[in-house]
Image (spheres, coloured by chain):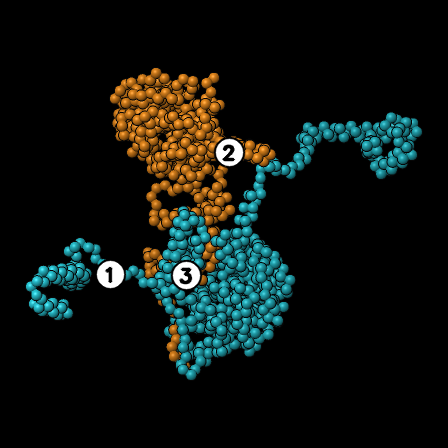
Amino acid sequence: MPLLVVLLSFSVLFLLLPPSLLTLRELLIAKMAKQQQKRQFKKSNKPQKFRKSEVKDGMQITEFKVNQKGRAKKKRFMGRKVVPSKLLQKYSKGEGVELKTIGRKDSCVQNKMKKKEKKIKWAEEESARAEILLTESKGQLEAEEGTYTSHITQTEIKKAVDITSAAKSFDLNLDQFGPYKMQFTQNGRHLLLGGRKGHLASMDWITKKLHYEINVMESIHDVCWLHTEVMMAAAQKQWVYIYDNQGIELHCLKQMDRVLKLEFLPYHFLLCSGSESGFLNWLDVTLGKEVLRTPTHKGRLDVMCQNPYNAVLCCGHPNGTVTMWTPNAPEPVASILCHPHPVRAIDIDHTGMYMATVGVDRQMKIWDARNLGKCLQHYTISSGASNVAFSQKSLLSVAIGNIVEVYRNVTLGGTDHAYMRHKAGGIITDMQFCPYEDILGISTYKGYSSLIIPGSGEPNFDALEANPYISISGRKEAEVKALLSKVPAELITLDPLSIGQVDIPTLKEKLEAKKALLYVRKPKIDFTPRYRMKGKSGSSQKFKRKQKDWKLKAASSKMIQRLKHMDPDHWLDSEAVKFYSPGLLSLLIAVNYLFFPINFGSRLKNIVISITV
Amino acid sequence: MSIKSINVLSRNPDHYMRETKYDIHKVQRNYDPTLHPFEASREYKLALNSVKLEKVFAKPFVGSLTHTEGVSALCRHPSRLSCVFTGTVEGELRLWDISHKKCEWTVQAHSGQIWSIVAAPDGNSFFTVGNDKTIKKWSLDKAKEGDHDLPIDTWLSDTIVTGISHHRHRNEFITCGERVLLWDASNKAPKFSYDWSTSGDRNDASVASIKFNPVETDLFASCDYANNIVLYDTRAKEVKKLKMTLRINALAWNPMEAFILTAASEDYNAYSYDIRKLNTPDQVVNIHKGHTAAVLDVDYSPTGREFCTASYDKSIRIFRTEEAHSRDVYHTKRMFKVSCVLWSGDNKFILSGSSDHNVRLWKSKSNEKMGIMRARERSAINYAEELKRKYGHFPAVRRIARHRHLPKHIYNAKNEQQIMRESRARKDANRLKYSTPGKKVHIPARQKVVVGLQDDGVVGFQDMDNMPGTSTN
């Protein structure tokens, strides 16, 4: 429309123009025509999406209009969806290399690094994108307004959830052989129970299938699964025993005596124990060889846990310190004074970032497990707790007497109220969150019970790491694979990624050594010739030697005979001895004669020679 | 009830387990890094395992082709992988089907040693040169028929011919011996004679080996008994002549980077030259060390990334072109002095002819799996390769990867030579240190081996006449 108006106005203008300006008019018209043409051209160039679209055999077929000029159609696809940076951070493999610091600009090295960095970035992004494929979602519990979740009882939960989940919450009444110790397997499928009075049982707790149940007729202080559900260790009165899933005793580990606490490092195949006498012991279960046995010099070792992030053992001591140990050094790699009173319980979350300690002083503290010595939070609880446990989703449960309390966000500042609270039938002796399930297992003086704690377990497992639904053949294969990739015990350090980093001091040393290497002097070889018995071992030589001895003996006996009949003064006149004072010599002879009557001759000779020398 | 909403983890086992035993197992993945601890150290362990497995599978020997005499020459067909000619020291020529390890045809080609065999570029005929001063051309088709034992063409030379090389496209070939001759296949007389290395005072210089450049097709190189490497051009004359301290036994051009010439030397090393830099002091690009006796032959892989050398020390070695030390060394208890070596056209095999009457067939990569592989196998191998590359510089990995079992004579000779080298280096360093500053200069090892260069009209960086080996008397 405005175009039309402009045109009209122009035409009016033209009519008004005098004829002398006709040429100008013509020019103007020509110019306008050109402009109009341009506009039309622009219009035709606008991409028209499609010519026609029809539905044929249930499929929509769209014909795109091909541009007459043959230009490529504009791309409609704007690329993949951008991954949120927070998600990328979760899968981050580190900051990467600062490319500017490596080589010249666009040098071969820099380009190589660039390519490598690109690959790593790609891997990070792809793994973040793969999160969309995760099927299960985290559990959660919400209370109605005005009420607290901690007031919700297990029976209420059991009623509210589906029947399979409700079946996961159960109690085992075992009041004869308690107090009990317990542990779940890596994949959370099996449960091992050990009663102080000798009761040992393992079961598939989801299907409630009992594998075996025995009484070892000895006290059991702790139990521990090994790498699969076919082998388990029990710390008994004197030694540690290993049983299989039928309750058959496989080994008796006499390297570990009077053990109070057992831990198994699944990627290193190390069974660790803390003993009554304060000894720490690492045992390679694949070889049955002791890696290290070291005294902590800090009394009974019944408070111990492993850091799942770096396989370092953390021990809590009666003097309030927590020490961290690797099997590569006989002294702790770190030591923190956590409480002014004895440490009662300790646990580290599975990211290896937080450590929770509980002391007799009714304090619960959360520590930064990597930046040691930094207490993040501390809480005062109603009385000294006997156990703490982190779940996979960083819930923290604390056992105080017969009450277990579960907290959320303890690392971020904590909450006034417990997330959940449960009163058990007896005093709680051990507890653990079941991996990959919303279950907290607690064992007491009077048995075992499992509690439903919504949101405690990791919803999506990785079947190549831990698979609750693994078949027997799958388990066997995984066992072989795990054995092949058994991490050497020497690689246990506080920073598990240190193996991928450049060992700068050693490199420096190397370079310096290279610099110092000058071809100036031949290196001195420390060489001492080997002492050789020159042909004394041959049979002929032996024979000769014997004959020689015999001859000597004969000669000496003759000499003795002669000496007996000889006048000593006359004898001393003989050539060999005449230079020496007769008194001394006769004394020597007398002494020799007294003490070595048989070998007298040869002895005498020796003495004479030694004197001459 | 005070529960507003509750959601508890409850998995349906059917989603995680296979339905029947004929299905594959379901593998649920979660790439959350916290579920995969000890990433670095586990990967390191896998790298260690893969490098150990490489050693376990390192069985390079494939088979042997038995002759009645020591083998002196090898030649492969330009396009057929299984077709190989071998020549012996008694003049016997054999055609082999490598894939079946079967001798297809035998003929007494020359009286005396067959020095060299070369294929015509079309692949229909082969040339042999022998001690009887003749050059013979054999037809492959007739040989395949069986009982045919006459050459299709014969040229007579007036001297012994010790090497032959065929032009890439034209119907021309060059031979060497006491003289370097260029022949046109349609003529019975040589087309041209190159007399540089043989004329006048340097009469002792009998040429040992000659090779046409595969890319710059008019260029060829020869090496002679007077320690020279000579470059020629068929369009002009001799181009350049490089004198070394010791004799060069064989030459090979890099088929991909054809400006690189590799020479097998009598001083236990192989040398790579860049012919573009021949006039400069850094013409030797690399010294490939490792053999403990004279290197007798050298041949490039068709990829141009690796080459293998045959040596008097009863072993063959494989070098990467850019590396000074060998990637691998092959030997057997019964293999004797290796006189010729050949890399197969598909880059998978190496043939070595030795004086124990055998041609041995080796895998070029000792741990390579032969035959068809499934995708999983392939990817597992690729993963292992990548791991080995990534962790290759770790001491434990490198130690295993580098270790080769050597026969006692090579092991001892290696140690002995190491001591000699060290003492020489020490002596040099001492001389340098205790002489007046500036009087003695450090000469790099790569320059030490070159005596001098003679160019057409251009005087080299060192004067040729002052060289010890070329004096007129």
Chain A drawing hue: cyan
Of callouts 1 and 3, which one flags the residue occurring earlier in the amino acid sequence?
1
Relative depth, front residue between B146 and B362: B362
Question: In the rendering, which numbered label is found on residue B443?
Answer: 2
Say if B76 sits above or below A211 in the image: above
The image quadrant of residue B82 is top left
Mark 1 vs mark 2: give the one in front. 2
Secondary structure under tag 3 reads loop
Image point 45% across, 51% down: which residue? Answer: A102
Percent coordinates x, y for residue B70 in the rendering: 41, 24
Whether label 2 touches label 3, CB < 8 Å: no
> Does residue A477 appear to the left or right of A321 in the view shown?
left
Relative depth, front residue between B175 and A283: B175
> Does residue A217 appear to the left or right of A455 in the view shown?
right
Say if A176 sits above or below B443 in the image: below
Whether label 1 touches label 2, CB < 8 Å: no
Mark 1 vs mark 3: give the one in front. 1
Q: State which quarter of the image contains the N terminus of chain B.
A: bottom left
Using the rendered image of the protein, determine whether residue B38 is visible from the camera's viewpoint. Answer: yes
Relative depth, front residue between B356 and A74: A74
Q: Residues within 10 Å of mark 2 (few under 14, many from 20)?
A: few
Using the rendered image of the protein, determine whether residue B415 is visible from the camera's viewpoint. Answer: no
Chain B drawing hue: orange
For mark 3, what is the residue?
Answer: A91
Q: Amino acid at mark 3?
A: Tyr
How far apart, in angstroms, are the residues tagged by discs 1 and 2? 65 Å
